């Protein structure tokens, strides 16, 4: 293929595609209309392939709309699996020219939002399924994600003495992940939902410029899965240099689920860290965590409530804090801890608390909340 390739400017129409063996997508910006796709040297996008006709397809502009038509080619042009006959093009549409896959893009985008899927496997996608069926199913999955576009909720860990932020906690809102939507398996939807939310969180945190610890929090009741492990690895590569990333896993998962415990042990090998949330155990329970080597222990409300008025509760909390210090684990108070209980915990050696507020400016927070729908539309590689 040949054609002008450059970094796209905001809202300029373009075609994105993968060449065989390439590490990333190529981009051809559409400068003039009509824009021809074909094998001839004069085509706006020249595709040097025998299955492509000399003048194969043409993209035209009608006001703010874009249309694509097949020019009587031998092997046809398809948009989302359907024949192209003055077919309107929308941001993210899949175009197939003979056996070449392209993606039409218009909206401005960040690095993660520009990701396009690699071409689907050649030939039928399974017994009784045509390529058009596969493309159509792919589009339904994208629409399913857009239906329940994830939102990112932020909190932070702060030093009790200086009020300085030492880490950011991210939790994606899973409400709606199981609501009726286009055909899409709920488990797959939740995994893709979380992947996108975490990628958005890492990318937005990177805009701060300074190194930061990002803690990705699983929702209570959701078991740790291998998909979470891979999603966290992908998010880690979006962070600024010298930043760290940790998965926040509910403490009770490590006591009830041997598979989750094994996954937790494997985090360190990939450069990921472990934080356990909702801890409500004793000093002996902390001792049992030595093989997992968590960085932080987020204490539950039940673990510290009444520590200022109940001697037994104070004694239990003190033993937990002492054991954490011996193992190099940082205990962290939950949000909404009473001032009296917080004061006693500080005396016992707890130096950090979860704050419901994060050090993001309103503008940054708006971008975080508003980024998910676009990211969902563009992170197609997750869904195939």
Image (cartoon, rainbow, N blue to C red):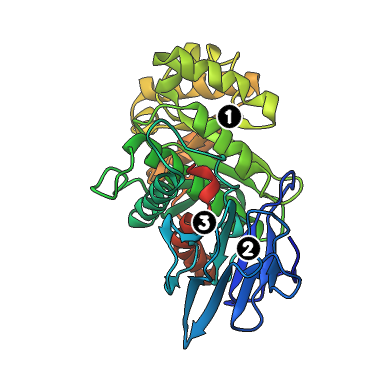
* 137, above or below 66, in the image: above
Q: Earlier in the sequence, mark 2 or mark 1?
A: 2
At 38% across and 57% down in the image, what residue appears? 146
Q: Is residue 315 visible?
A: no
Q: CA distance from mark 2 to mark 1?
A: 55 Å
Which is closer to the viewer, label 2 or label 1?
Answer: 2
Return the residue found at the far bottom: 63
> Neighbour class for label 3 at 10 Å: few (<14), some, many (≥20)?
some
Q: CA distance from mark 3 to mark 2?
A: 56 Å
Circle 2 residue: 53
Circle 3 residue: 358
At 49% across and 11% down in the image, what residue appears? 284
Q: Residue 290: horizontal and vertical position, in percent?
A: 60, 15
Q: CA distance from mark 3 to mark 1?
A: 20 Å
* 225, above or below 14, in the image: above
At 42% across and 46% down in the image, what residue appears? 193
Front-most of 35 and 188? 35
Which is closer to the viewer, label 3 or label 2?
Answer: 2
Front-most of 213 and 193? 193
Q: Is residue 67 visible?
A: yes
Q: Residue 329: horizontal and vertical position, in percent?
A: 61, 26
Which is closer to the viewer, label 3 or label 1?
Answer: 1
Front-most of 244 and 279? 244
Q: Helix, strand, or loop for circle 1?
A: strand
* 230, above or below 280, in the image: below
Q: Is residue 293 left or right of residue 370?
A: right
> Neighbour class for label 2 at 10 Å: few (<14), some, many (≥20)?
many
Q: Is residue 29 left or right of residue 192?
A: right
Q: Residue 32: horizontal and vertical position, in percent?
A: 64, 84
Q: Residue 375: horizontal and vertical position, in percent?
A: 51, 57
Circle 1 residue: 274
């Amino acid at each position: 293929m040949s054609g002008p390739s450059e970094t796209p400017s905001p809202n300029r129409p373009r075609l994105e595609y993968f060449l065989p063996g390439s590490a990333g997508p190529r981009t051809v910006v559409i400068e003039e209309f009509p824009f021809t796709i074909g094998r001839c040297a004069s085509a706006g996008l020249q595709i040097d392939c025998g299955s492509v006709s000399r003048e194969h397809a043409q993209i035209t502009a009608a006001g703010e709309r874009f249309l694509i038509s097949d020019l009587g080619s031998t092997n046809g042009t398809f948009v989302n699996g359907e024949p192209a006959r003055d077919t309107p093009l929308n941001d993210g549409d899949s175009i197939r020219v003979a056996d070449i896959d392209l993606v039409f893009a218009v909206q401005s985008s960040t690095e993660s939002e520009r990701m396009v899927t690699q071409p689907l496997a050649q030939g039928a996608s399974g017994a009784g399924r045509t390529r058009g069926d596969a493309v159509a199913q792919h589009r339904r999955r994208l629409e399913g994600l857009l239906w329940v576009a994830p939102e990112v909720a932020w909190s932070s860990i702060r030093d009790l003495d200086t009020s300085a932020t030492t880490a950011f906690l991210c939790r994606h809102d899973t409400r709606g992940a199981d609501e009726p939507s286009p055909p899409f398996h709920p488990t797959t939807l939740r995994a893709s939902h979380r992947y996108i939310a975490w990628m958005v969180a890492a990318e937005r945190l990177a805009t701060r410029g300074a190194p930061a610890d990002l803690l990705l929090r699983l929702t209570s009741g959701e078991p740790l899965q291998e998909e979470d492990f891979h999603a966290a690895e992908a998010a880690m590569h979006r962070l600024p240099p010298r930043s760290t990333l940790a998965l926040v896993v509910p403490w009770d998962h490590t006591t009830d689920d041997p598979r989750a415990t094994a996954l937790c042990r494997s985090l360190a090998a990939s450069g990921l860290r472990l934080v356990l949330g909702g801890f409500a155990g004793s000093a002996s329970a902390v001792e049992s965590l030595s093989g997992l080597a968590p960085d932080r222990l987020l204490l539950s409300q039940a673990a510290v409530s009444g520590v200022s008025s109940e001697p037994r509760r104070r004694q239990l909390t003190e033993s937990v804090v002492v054991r954490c210090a011996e193992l190099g684990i940082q205990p962290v108070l939950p949000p909404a801890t009473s001032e009296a209980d917080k004061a006693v915990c500080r005396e016992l050696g707890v130096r950090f608390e979860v704050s419901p507020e994060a050090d993001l400016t309103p503008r940054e927070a708006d971008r975080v909340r508003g980024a998910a729908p676009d990211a969902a539309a563009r992170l197609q590689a997750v869904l195939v």
